[in-house]
Image (tube, rainbow, N blue to C red):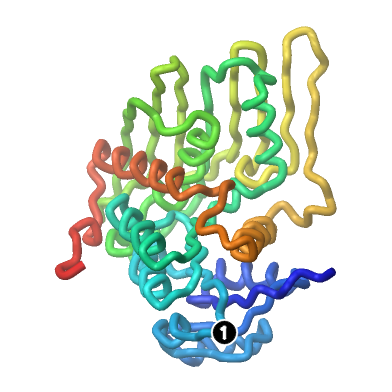
Amino acid sequence: MAEQSVRWGILATGGIAAAFAADLVDLPDAEIVAVASRRRESAEAFAERFGAERAYGDWESLAADQDVDVVYVATPHSAHRAAAGLCLRAGRNVLCEKPFTLNLREAEELVALAREHGRFLMEAMWMYCNPLVRRLRALVADGAIGDVRTVQADFGIAGPFPAGHRLRDPALGGGALLDLGVYPVAFAQLLLGEPDGIAASAVLSPEGVDLQTGAVLSWDSGALAALHCSITGGTGTTASVTGTRGRIDVPSGFFHPERFVLHREGRDPEEFAADPADGPRTSLRHEAREVMRAVRAGEKESPLVPLEGTLAVMRTLDAVRERIGVRYPGDAAPVGV
């Protein structure tokens, strides 16, 4: 028996929205019914491209659309709080792109709104829904490498980005940490939970955003994570998890891996590869399927991307920013909110 179709609204029409919509189109139990942009022309072009019935030139109309089961918020992260909050208040379920918000305060406000209105809310941390990442986590949890002692992860892109680019704009939450560093932090916390200690250093741009940041997270268990992000140089985007009885190495693209290798003393290395049936490594279908599964089941959050885990990552990102001296205009609480 076919699953009931889940009707999606897409809020914003940029590159990540297009990538997500393209994957939704390939899912037989998903339907894009509405699109919203602050420019009606953009919404209409996007709707025509992906077969949506309605195109709105404002966010409010999409939030009020009773035919929409879930809204995917794909704005720049500086607008996540406003866009997702609008949808939650209107009674829509929400999948919100990462990083979830600019800061912990905004994240807590969204979680509170979701719980107040009884709506589903999830950060679009697609890494957590990736089948191979889930396999890696299960191996670690089952003790395949013993007690975790170190996690290493990096994510850097080469640039250069001009001063007017969004990645260098403090008003848009620019810098390496929120756009890229969220992945190494989320990877470490997926395996070890929220850290007990945080140290960090960064190189800042003239505008005051981080061009590259290094962070060391520590846990009372004795585990450490060495993490790096950059918008000034392309890194290998690799990760490694070392335990008392072995190691797991993840080659390029650790947040959507094609494979990883398990090393254990006295045994040949074991390679775990992605299943071709799961689609391209860049596919966002896994998070979409998880949202649809949860919404059909009446769940208010996903066990794969729990809200407390999202808040814990935001706490770490706030702490790193405090240590490197990066503040955004949006860090100040808006009057009346």
In this picture, residue 65 sits left or right of residue 166? right
The answer to whether 266 is drawn above or below residue 201 in the figure is above
Q: Which residue: 68% across, 70% down?
A: 24
Q: Report the front residue among 88 and 126.
A: 88
Name the residue furthest left.
335
Q: Report the front residue among 115 and 28.
A: 115
Image quadrant where residue 181 sits: top left
Q: Position of residue 105 (x, y in %)?
A: 27, 53
Q: Position of residue 119 (x, y in %)?
A: 46, 66
User: How crowded is the residue under tag 1: few (<14 C-alpha within 10 Å), some, or many (20+)?
Assistant: some
Q: Is residue 269 visible?
A: yes
Q: Mark 1: which secondary structure? A: loop
Q: Is residue 232 visible?
A: no
Q: Position of residue 22 (x, y in %)?
A: 68, 72
Total labels drawn: 1
Where's the N terminus, which quadrant? bottom right
Where's the C terminus, which quadrant? bottom left
Task: Check disc 1 and give the amino acid type.
Answer: Asp
In this picture, residue 50 sits left or right of residue 335? right
Would you name the residue on which mark 1 appears? 67
The answer to whether 268 is drawn above or below residue 259 in the figure is above
Q: Position of residue 261 (x, y in %)?
A: 74, 28
The answer to whether 234 is drawn above or below residue 153 in the figure is below
Q: Which residue: 39% across, 68% down?
A: 117
Image quadrant where residue 212 sits: top left
Image quadrant where residue 308 sits: top left
Q: Which residue: 49% across, 83% down?
A: 36
In this picture, residue 336 sits left or right of residue 228? left
Q: Which residue: 52% across, 21% down?
A: 150
In this picture, residue 162 sits left or right of residue 50? left
The answer to whether 58 is drawn above or below residue 251 in the figure is below
